[in-house]
Image: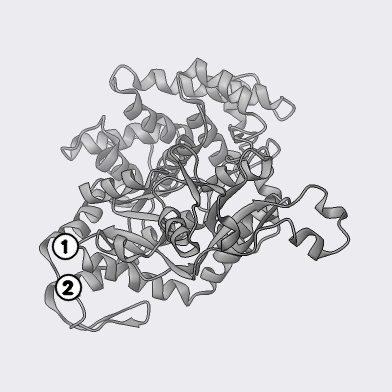
Amino acid sequence: MRTNVRTPFILFFFLLFSFACTHNEIKIDKNSLKIPEIALSRYEIIKERGKLIAVTDYNSINYFVYRGEPMGYQYELLQSLADYLGVGLEIIVNHDLDKSFQMLDSGNIDIIAMDLAVTRRRAELVDFTKPLQKTRQVLVQRKPEGWRNMRTVNQMEKHLIREPLELAGKTVFIQKNTTFQRRLENLSEEIGDSIHIVQDPQRDVEELIRAVNTGEIDYTVCDEHIGLINEKYYPDIDVQTPVSFSQNIAWAIKKGNEPFVDTINIWLDAFKKKPLATYVYNKYFHNPRQVFMARSDFHSVQGGKISDYDDIIRRESAKLGWDWRLLASLIYQESRFHPEVESWVGAYGLMQLMPQTARSYGVDTNSTPAEHIAAGVNFLKWLDRQFKPIISDSAERTKFVLASYNVGIGHVYDAQRLAEKNDKNPIEWDSSVDFYLLNKSKPAYYQDDVVKYGYCRGEEPYAFVYEILERYEHYKNVIKN
């Protein structure tokens, strides 16, 4: 769970008491915001819940995992917004736009963070944030065979559609429930001839682009910025023919949440002024390394692997009774999958076992990665056995095991005793044992009579648990079990 002191309490109190204030050097006009009760409740729900829930699409630009790390343009923007709000972030992957709008309307999510074109029809259903960027719709088609050997550009151009009139009688596949359908219908009307539109219920935009590249289909339509990125991955496609004017791309919020929209817009205005905004944009849209990453076995979209050790992790996690992706998240947290890494306190290997623990499980610096993973799993099994008699719920028990793996089981026992002494549930992690472990660096806690193992830097194991579980959720979103 991420925390950030830069919470928008200034804006919150401004909404309650109507006085002028600033946040991130942006002045707010006190007459510009109104507070419908339902909007305030949405803001309170997010704060009370402790996380922002967003729907986005899983592709090689917006959201993916590369070498164990969650990445993506929409993901990084959403994480920045969540940090600004002082809450965690939960990502839901969904390519069905109708379902996404239904989830938004029902209140199951807070925001749709996709490449949504702002249209009048959609604006009647949702509130849009300020635009994130502008784009236009382009035709995706395949270059003629042997185009690299053609002597002139004009020779290749003869084989490509460059005028909308040339789409007459053609079949164009598009992602279902997108604005591409309406645009092609209007284009068909404008050219006075039929364009055969096939809405694909299964494949998203990038999958349809790949289908054009392989020759499975001849045409699809996408937003230009998506097309330009994919043109780098697939040199045999062409995305130079526009089929629409420029359109704003924005995030969608449920109708009636004006203060929440205004809060996002304040963050967005400030974010766009920072060098970070340019860095993040260039990272995903103008970075030559993106092509290399997208073709890697360790890119979740193309290769689907988390690390070189996936097969070993799968095998060993079965002995523990864990989802292998959870164990992978722990190993990423410990070593980033680098077997040679050694910490400042002497822990080493993929599982970052301390020397004494490593020796007790029969491994040392000369042991193989497979042996280190097996040793780490045996240690996790031992920890799990210590808590199993008192914590029957395996998901809850895992949090105690993870914390103990990081800081030692004695400090977790201390936190349990502190929780019990203060009338909290000693076998419940969230807002109970985690609080006392987090604060075990303070004299008021580590000097308490029930504490047997003294001082510890509680921030580290506290973050360790939540970051592993958060990353695990990302792995579950995009990596097959």
- Side of 364 relative to 45 (left or right): right
Whole-Å distance between the Cαs marked 2 and 1? 9 Å
Sequence-first tag of 2 and 1:
2
Where in the figure is residue 225, as x and y percent of width and height? 56, 62
The spot of residue 452 in percent (x, y) is 34, 34
- Left or right, 233 with reference to 404: right
Dot 2, how many residues are within 10 Å of its Cα: few (below 14), some (14-19), or many (20+)?
some
Say which quarter of the image contains residue 298: top right
Q: Is residue 154 left or right of residue 173?
A: right
Residue linked to disc 2: 15
Asked whether residue 433 appears in the rendered view, the answer is: yes
Expressed as whole percent of the image width and height from the top left, the position of residue 25 reads 37, 81
* Three-letter residue code for mark 2: Leu
| Residue 447 is at least partly visible in this image | no
Residue drawn at x 28%, y 71% is: 262
Q: Residue at x 47, y 25 (%)?
A: 323
Q: Residue at x 29, y 53 (%)?
A: 110
Q: How is the image coloured?
A: one colour
Q: Residue 448 sits in which quadrant?
A: top left
Badge 2 marks a residue whose secondary structure is: helix
Q: Nearer the viewer, residue 249 or 455?
A: 249
Q: How many marks?
A: 2
Q: Residue furthest front?
A: 192
Instruction: Please say if the residues under marks 2 and 1 sit with CB atoms less than 8 Å apart.
Output: yes
Above or below: residue 199 compared with residue 257: above
Which residue does the image show at 14% across and 69% down from the upper left?
35
Q: Return the mark for residue 40.
A: 1
Circle 1: element type:
helix
Name the residue nearer the viewer: 435 or 422: 435
Name the residue type under label 1: Leu
